[in-house]
Image (cartoon, rainbow, N blue to C red):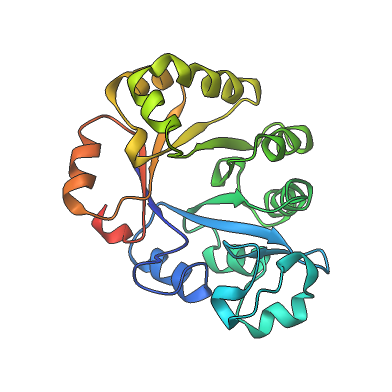
């Protein structure tokens, strides 16, 4: 199956990581919806990309230092609010952004599986932070996990030129029983795809918005694409 993944909902059509954006992604037929999670001061996992609120109210208040009652005024939803909106209509990729997100997010997922008729396969936990992925694996070994690999220079140049460096990421992914590995669009090439497929890992590419590039990537045999415009996938 090729996954059409709505990046932060449908961020090209509505403000990212908002209820409006998630509803739009569902309306556009996304197979999976990606979102970002931090923990606020009162302990709730909240859906926002940045660690502070500067982009929302021009004040650099850290999410970890703000009560949810205040974040709610900025229309920042709790993870559970978003899951209730999605309600099994699409799979969910939760990217762990902040410290101490692994355990509370795992507990919420367990609750939705045990009490709300969701399945393990409806969830995918991803992060750039290997520590958070290890913590997730310890909390919930069965849940699907994914390592995010970014385009840091000059590392990205070396990774593409010498794909054997990629083996380090594959080794870690296997250690935590990953379902997939998520690569920046500038990192992808046929050798890297073959290496991941040999390890039976799905390959998802982020974040691709141009239709020509989307079409090209699909010819390479990848398993999914993140886009701000899921309707282009």
Q: Is residue 199 visible?
A: no
Asked whether the viewer can see residue 170, the reply is yes
- In this rendering, is residue 39 above or below 233? below
Which residue is the extreme one toward the bottom? Answer: 73
Instruction: Tally the numbered discs.
Output: 0
**Which residue is at the front of the view, 57 or 121?**
57
Q: Residue furthest right?
A: 42
Q: Position of residue 88 (x, y in %)?
A: 53, 57
Position in image of residue 85 (x %, y %): 55, 69
Tell me if residue 75 comes above or below residue 129 in the rendering: below
Q: Residue at x 40, y 38 (%)?
A: 204
| Residue at the limit of the structure toward the left, as seen here | 212
Query: Which residue is pictured at 73% across the width and 46% down the height?
Result: 102
In the rendered structure, the answer to whether residue 136 lies left or right of residue 83 reads right
Q: Position of residue 215 (x, y in %)?
A: 18, 43
| Left or right: 200 as drawn, with respect to 188 | right
């Amino acid at each position: 199956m090729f996954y059409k993944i709505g990046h932060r909902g449908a961020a090209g059509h509505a403000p990212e990581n908002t209820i409006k954006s998630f509803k739009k992604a569902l309306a556009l037929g996304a197979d999976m919806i990606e979102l970002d999670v931090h923990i606020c001061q009162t302990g709730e996992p909240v859906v926002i990309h940045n660690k502070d609120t500067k982009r929302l109210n021009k004040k650099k208040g850290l999410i970890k230092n703000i009560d949810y009652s205040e974040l709610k005024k900025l229309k920042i939803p709790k993870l559970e609010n978003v899951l209730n909106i999605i309600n099994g209509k699409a799979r969910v990729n939760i990217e762990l952004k902040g410290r101490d997100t692994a355990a509370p997010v795992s507990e919420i997922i367990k609750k939705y599986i045990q009490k709300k008729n969701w399945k393990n396969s409806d969830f995918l936990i991803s992060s750039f932070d290997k520590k958070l992925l290890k913590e997730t694996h310890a909390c919930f070994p069965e849940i699907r996990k994914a390592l995010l690999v970014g385009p840091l220079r000059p590392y990205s140049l070396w990774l593409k030129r010498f794909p054997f460096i990629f083996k380090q990421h594959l080794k870690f992914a296997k250690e935590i029983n990953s379902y997939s590995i998520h690569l920046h669009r500038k990192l992808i090439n046929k050798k890297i795809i073959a290496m991941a497929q040999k390890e039976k890992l799905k390959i998802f590419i982020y974040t691709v918005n141009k239709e020509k590039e989307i079409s090209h990537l699909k010819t390479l045999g990848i398993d999914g694409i993140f886009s701000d415009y899921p309707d282009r996938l």
